[in-house]
Image (cartoon, rainbow, N blue to C red):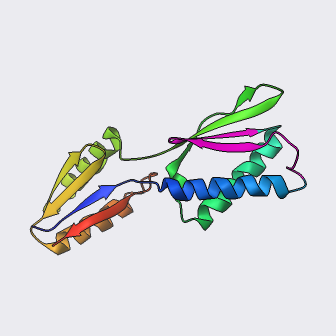
């Protein structure tokens, strides 16, 4: 029986490469060199520190640029509100989304079932498993999910005949 999985995985090695590039550019740029601007990653969280909101905006632009170079979807980032940090600086946490949460999984599952496509969809932890009798039904399901306009990067893996 043909099947595939719907997952949401962010390649943390590519995020690390982008962070390293940003750190190099911070040291080299005349407007950022010698400031408190920094970016670090621990587990699934990026932490950006800047002197003021203008420099924080520049760090945001650098982050978008380097993630685009490394083919990391910007929708995988969840920006939290900036907070005041020590020494009159600003700190902002950015969560890296991994996996499909339960609410989004239920939303996708309910929409696919309501579309009357002849597929079976099951939520398996942080991913969705879709199976059908015909390959065409699976391809129609992928197109349907893509058209749902979900603000979450999704990948379609393990396509089996």
Residue 119 locus on image (x, y percent) = 15, 60
Q: Is residue 7 above or below residue 123?
A: below
**Res 137 visible:** yes
Q: Quadrant of the N terminus?
A: bottom left
Task: Point out the stretch of residues depicted in magenta.
Answer: 31-49
23 on left or right of 12: right
Q: Residue visible at 19% across and 74% down? A: 136
Q: Quadrant of the C terminus?
A: bottom left
Q: Residue visible at 20% across and 53% down? A: 114
150 on left or right of 56: left
**Res 116 visible:** no
Q: Is residue 44 magenta?
A: yes
Residue closer to the observer: 88 or 149? 88
Q: Residue visible at 75% across and 56% down? A: 24
Residue 120 locus on image (x, y percent) = 14, 56
Residue 138 locus on image (x, y percent) = 21, 68
Q: Is residue 26 magenta?
A: no
67 on left or right of 6: right
Q: Is residue 105 above or below residue 81?
A: below
Residue 100 locus on image (x, y percent) = 35, 46
127 on left or right of 16: left
Residue closer to the observer: 13 or 45? 13
């Amino acid at each position: 029986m043909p099947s595939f999985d719907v997952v949401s995985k962010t390649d943390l090695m590519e995020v690390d490469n982008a962070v390293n590039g940003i750190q190099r550019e911070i040291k080299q740029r005349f407007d950022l060199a010698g400031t408190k601007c920094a970016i670090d990653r621990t587990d699934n969280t990026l932490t950006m520190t800047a002197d003021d909101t203008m420099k924080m905006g520049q760090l945001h632009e650098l982050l978008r640029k380097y993630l685009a170079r490394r083919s990391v979807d910007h929708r995988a980032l969840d920006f939290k509100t900036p907070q005041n940090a020590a020494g009159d600086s600003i700190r902002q946490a950015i969560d890296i989304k991994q996996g499909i949460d339960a609410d989004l999984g239920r939303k996708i599952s309910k929409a696919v079932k309501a579309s009357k496509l002849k597929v079976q969809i099951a939520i398996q932890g942080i991913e969705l498993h879709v199976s059908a009798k015909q390959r065409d039904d699976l391809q129609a399901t992928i197109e349907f999910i893509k058209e749902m306009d979900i603000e979450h990067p999704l990948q379609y893996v393990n396509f089996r005949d």
